[in-house]
Image (tube, helix red, strand yellow):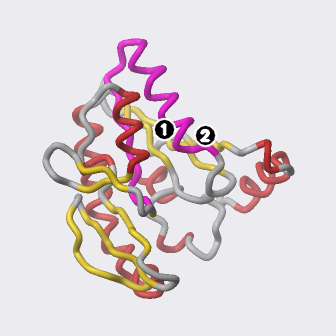
Amino acid sequence: MRGGGLLVAGTTSDAGKSVVTAGICRWLVRRGVKVAPFKAQNMSLNSFVTREGAEIGRAQAMQAQAARVEPTALMNPVLLKPGSDRSSQVVLMGKPVGEMSARGYHGGRQEALLGTVTDCLEELRSTYDAVICEGAGSPAEINLRRTDIVNMGIARAARFPVLVVGDIDRGGVFASFFGTTALLSA
C-alpha cells in the first residue's frame, strides 16, 4: 500500500526532529518499507546539492541516506537561506528564485507555495510506501498558523498522524509537550 506517512513535529526548533525523522526512515527501510523523507520548508544556510543539481537542506539529504534513497528536490521543495536579519534567499525546487523579506514571505508568498509543496508530497506518496515528514520549529506557533505549509497544515492536507518530539536536556520538556498540544486547534 502506497501513500502512508507521518509528521514529526517538535516542541521547539532543535528539538531533535531531523534525527528522529532519519531514525524512523532507517527503521522502516530495515523492515522492507520503501520510505522517503520530506520537509516542505527548511531554513538553513547548510545545503546539499543533489545529483540533478538541485539545492536542498542537508538534513533531508541525511534522511534520504538513512532511507537508502537518492535525495531529490521533491524531499525539500522550499529552502530558505538567511541572508540577513530580515531577508532570505528563496530556493524553490532546488533553484534560487530570489530574495524575500520575512514580511513578504509570511504575507502571502508562503501560501502561494502550498500547491508546490502538496504536489511534491503527493508525488512522493505515489512512489513510496511511506513518507516521513519533518516539521519546522513548533506547530504551536500561533503567529504562523494561518500560513502554515510545513507543520499541521501539511499534516491535515495529507491526513497524517503527528508525533511530537522534545529535547529533555533543555529542561521543562513535559511543560513544553503540554503547552504545544494545548495550543493546537482541535
Position of residue 19 in the picture relative to residue 116 (left or right): right
Residue 51 point in image, percent of width and height: 16, 43
Q: Dot 1, crowdedness within 10 Å: few (<14), some or many (≥20)?
A: many
Q: Are the two marked residues, 2 and 1, in contact with CB atoms closer than 8 angstroms?
A: yes
Locate residue 182: give its quadrant: bottom right
Tell me the element at label 1: strand
Q: Residue at x 20, y 64 (%)?
A: 95
Depth check: give the residue in front, 42 or 82: 82
Q: Amino acid at mark 1?
A: Leu
For the point 31% across and 53% down, the residue is 56
Q: Quadrant of residue 5?
A: top left
Label 2 – label 1 distance at C-alpha: 7 Å
Q: Residues within 10 Å of mark 2 (few under 14, many from 20)?
A: some
Disc marking residue 163: 2
Which residue, given by chain and number where applicable, does mark 1 sit on? 6
Q: Position of residue 157 (x, y in %)?
A: 41, 53
In the image, which residues are magenta? 16-42
First in sequence: mark 2 vs mark 1: 1
**Closer to us: 66 or 107:** 66
**Amino acid on which the number 2 mark rests in the picture:** Leu
Relative horizontal placement of residue 136, taking residue 89 as reference (left or right): right
**Secondary element type, mark 2:** strand
- Who's the residue at 44% across and 28% down the image? 25
In this view of the protein, which residue sits in the foreground, 100 or 138?
A: 100
